[in-house]
Image (spheres, coloured by chain):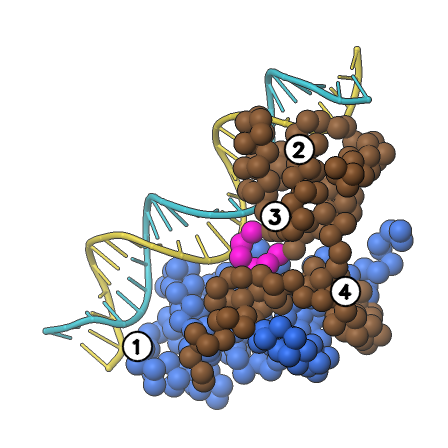
Chain colours: A brown, B blue, C cyan, D yellow
Amino acid sequence: MPHCHTLIAALRRSGYRLTPQREMIVEAIAHAGRHITAEEIFEQVRSRTGAVNIATIYRTLDLLVELGLVSCTDLGDGKIWYASSHHGPHCHLVCRYCGCVTEADYALLIPIDERLREQYGFVADLHHLAIPGVCAACQSKTNPR
Amino acid sequence: MPHCHTLIAALRRSGYRLTPQREMIVEAIAHAGRHITAEEIFEQVRSRTGAVNIATIYRTLDLLVELGLVSCTDLGDGKIWYASSHHGPHCHLVCRYCGCVTEADYALLIPIDERLREQYGFVADLHHLAIPGVCAACQSKTNPR
DNA sequence: TTTACTGCAAATAATTTGCAAAACT
DNA sequence: AGTTTTGCAAATTATTTGCAGTAAA
């Protein structure tokens, strides 16, 4: 488990205390290998020890995001999805019918990044962009207009 | 006020009843000329007559969205933003510091639209995409890493 | 007159907060 | 020891829902 150690070390280096709760939360995120919600982390940690509170999960996540160790994305489903910053950039294709989320190549956003910077002076955070639409599987189910 | 009449006519044509509440809600959206929230519509309509319920606003908005007369966008601030479909396609640049929202040209998303279709079979709904980042004004306030 | 629509009030659901007790360093 | 961090429970916020009464058609 090398990656969660990096995160834990970063927490320490920033002057924050290492508690068993934080350690377990960090491990849950680092080992997930995908985006997870606060609730999922809560369930996962609770099944290991029983001793955690959902408020602690939220507070720790806020901290990790602020330190830049974890990224968060709003996929428009009312929850916030978290992932280790180690998880490379990509965008999320969110289907409005089945709700499925596909990760797409980040490269196709690069030209947009540049143009937003030039034309609007806007530095976009495209590393976890959520794009709504209809997935390939749901294409046929949709009534053609 | 020609545009709200279009929406009202469309409601009628679809077999829905025209109530004073719906009329006022539709007018609020059509005349806003920008995206507004359910709460804003509520306040606006209430100041005109006092007789509306927030639940009615939500139910009417759901209906209008379903009929395709109104579009809704999640700008990641916990609210849903509504606009008349008459309001042309564009994307929203949402600043994560000051929260300001800038409308950007839709044209720069067209290449992405095409590539998502080709490579992933995903038909993106980019007409009101929200892009998180940092606006020009907040650029200087941010601590350079 | 029929039944779609509204108002009201209570229910959700995810997240946040205040405060006293517990535990890192 | 001293301050950070946690747990608990209550608060918040945006939105939804059940149901009985009201009003378009």
Depth check, front residue: D25 or B143: B143
Q: Which stretch appears magenta?
A: A74-79
Real-space Cα separation, disc 2 to disc 4, in angstroms: 32 Å
Q: State which chain disc 4 sits on.
A: A
Residue A35 in view = yes
Residue that carries the numbered disc 3 in the rendered image: A36
Above or below: residue B65 compared with residue A79: below
Q: State which chain disc 1 sits on.
A: B
Q: What SS does tag 3 mark?
A: strand
Q: State which mark lies toward you, 3 or 1.
A: 3
Residue that carries the numbered disc 2 in the rendered image: A24
Residue that carries the numbered disc 4 in the rendered image: A124
Q: Residues within 10 Å of mark 3 (few under 14, many from 20)?
A: some
Q: What SS does tag 1 mark?
A: loop
Above or below: residue B15 compared with residue B42: below
Real-space Cα separation, disc 1 to disc 2, in angstroms: 55 Å
Residue that carries the numbered disc 1 in the rendered image: B17
Q: Earlier in the sequence, mark 4 or mark 3?
A: 3
Q: State which mark lies toward you, 1 or 2.
A: 2
Marks 1/4 same chain: no
Q: Quadrant of the N terminus of chain A?
A: top right
Identify the main secondary structure in magenta. Answer: loop
Q: Is residue D10 toward the left or the right of residue C1 in the image? A: right
| Residue at the spot 70% in from the left edge and 38% down from the top edge | A26
Q: Quadrant of the C terminus of chain A?
A: bottom left
Q: Is residue A34 toward the left or the right of residue C14 in the image? A: right
Depth check, front residue: D14 or A39: A39
Q: Earlier in the sequence, mark 2 or mark 4?
A: 2
Residue B121, given in percent of the width and then of the height, sits at 59, 75
Above or below: residue A66 compared with residue C4: above
